[in-house]
Every structure is written in C-alpha cells, then in structure tokens.
Amino acid sequence: MKNLGKVLGYLIMIFFGVVILFPFLLLFLSSLKNAKELFRTGMNFSISLSTLTFENYRELFFGSSEYMRWYLNSLFILGVQVPLSIIFSSFVAYGFAMYEFKYKKIIFIFVLISMMVPFEIIMLPLYSTIGIMGLFDTYTGVILPFIVSSFAIFFFMQYLKGIPKSLVEAGRIDGCSEYRIFYSVIFPIMKPALITMVIFIAMGVWNGFLWPLLALTTSSKFTLPIGLSTLFTPYGNNYQILIAGAVFAVLPVVILFFRFQKYFINGMISGSVKE
C-alpha cells in the first residue's frame, strides 16, 4: 500500500511536470519552423525534418534586429537592480524586525499599503518624478524607483522574526557595530530568504515591460521585452523571429531557478519557523 502511494505520487508529479514543460517544448519546436511553415501549421508539435531550420536563430543574432543589444541591456538592469533591491529591502526589514522605535507600526502599515497599490496608480507620479529629475531615457530612471521593494521588506521581516534577537545582543556585547552585526551575523543566516527573493525580483525585472516602455525611448536602450515587441511592424509580423527570441529570453530565469532551487524551497518554508 505504501509503494502504491509512492507510485501514485510519482505519476502525479510526472503529470504536472509534463503540463509545466508543455509550453516550453511547444515554443522551442515552433522556433525551428520557417515563416511559411509556421503560418501553415501554427504552433503545434507537427514538424518535419525537411522544413526544420535554424535560420530564425541566425536572423535573430546576426540579422537586422538589435536582439543581443536588448539582451545585454536587460542583463545590465537585472544585474544592478536585483542586488540593490535585495540589500536595501533586507536592511529596512532588519530595522523593522529587530528595533523598537516611535511610530514603527504606523510606518509599517504604510509599507503594507504600498505593497497593495497597483503599479498603474503610481505610474504617472513616477513618470513625472523621473522627468523632473532628468532621468528620462536612462537606465537610472528605470532602476531607481524600484531599488526598494515593499513585498521584499514584508517577506524578509517575516523571515527575521524566526531569528533570535539574542544573536544581535551577543554581537553588541562583542563590540560589533550595528552594520557589522547585520552584514556579518544576520545577512548570512538570511541566505535562503535572500535567494528566494532574488528569484522573485529577477523574474519581475526580466519580464518588466510597462515601466521600461515609459522610461526608455531610444531603441538601442530598450530591454528585451520591449525590443521583441518592436518586431511587430506595419509591414509584417516576424513571428518566427519573435518565437526564437522568446526561447532565449526564458533561459536566465530558468537557469537561476534550477541553480538555486534548494535555497528557494528552504526560503519558502522557513519563514514559518519562529523563535
């Protein structure tokens, strides 16, 4: 009976694994079709060796589009925004979790409210603000408004509640400064939560479309989602190039997840452990 339950569990996991991988496999097979074959058969699993081609990838990397430029732009924004957001957000969460100060609850309520406000509501004030600061069409204008995440603050705070405050007090007794205690004692303990939030924030930054679309106007500065959207032109839609570009676009987030999968799972469950 125990073995039957285990087999049933494996079958359920295989089923959901196939369901999850199905869109990616469909996307990859479709990227190997030329434009004529793609319009004739659509996105499906029917593919013949006679029509199989890597021309879409050649056109993508060596053609007229600025695909690699957009890819590097997205990697740059990802590489700057994610570390800044993790550092500042964890720092703020540490203050909320470990210190008592006046109006702490009121300030934290504002943090929670900001987490619930849809981006579309703050979009225009942000747009005006970066305009006043002269940050239009700059990567700073794309990154600066999001170097602190209210969701990350809340997530880190819940995790830090499970860490004994006696560690902080022990650090103070040893003569460590508050910054030294945070970066040398608390920060390493937060590793599962940090990596979990890195994956969440990285996915948001990598797939971000609306804000970079508003903040950037020069084609060579576009991020990957905006660049791919420009492949739709009034003179014809390059669906085959777009699909090939989408295949490579998902790779960084997939690699990030599988590389840190163990920490991601630990980070998701360890927030429930309390002192």
Image (spheres, rainbow, N blue to C red):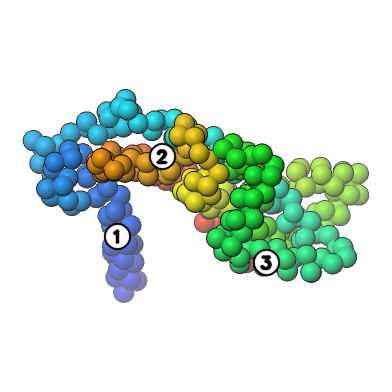
Three-letter amino acid code of the residue under disc 1: Val
Camera-nearest label, 3 or 2: 2
Three-letter amino acid code of the residue under disc 2: Gly
Within the image, what quadrant is residue 117 found in? bottom right
Counting from the top left corner in percent of width and height, residue 112 is at 67, 66
Q: Which residue is mark 3?
A: 112
Q: Earlier in the sequence, mark 3 or mark 1?
A: 1
Q: Which residue is mark 1?
A: 19
Rendered-image quadrant of the N terminus: bottom left
Counting from the top left corner in percent of width and height, residue 109 is at 73, 69
Q: Which residue is mark 2?
A: 227
User: Is 26 left or right of 252, judged from the image as shown?
Assistant: left
Within the image, what quadrant is residue 103 found in? bottom right
Rendered-image quadrant of the C terminus: bottom right
Q: Is residue 152 above or below residue 255?
A: below
Q: Earlier in the sequence, mark 2 or mark 1?
A: 1
User: Is 236 left or right of 265, judged from the image as shown?
Assistant: left
Counting from the top left corner in percent of width and height, residue 30 is at 22, 45
Q: CA distance from mark 2 to mark 1?
A: 29 Å
Camera-nearest label, 3 or 1: 3
Q: CA distance from mark 3 to mark 1?
A: 35 Å
Kindly state the secondary structure of the residue where label 2 is placed: helix
Residue closest to the eye, 269 or 35: 35
Q: Are marks 3 and 2 in contact (CB under 8 Å)?
A: no
Q: Residue furthest bottom?
A: 1
Q: Earlier in the sequence, mark 3 or mark 2?
A: 3
- Decide if residue 206 is in sight here: yes
- Decide if residue 203 is in sight here: no
Kindly state the secondary structure of the residue where label 1 is placed: helix
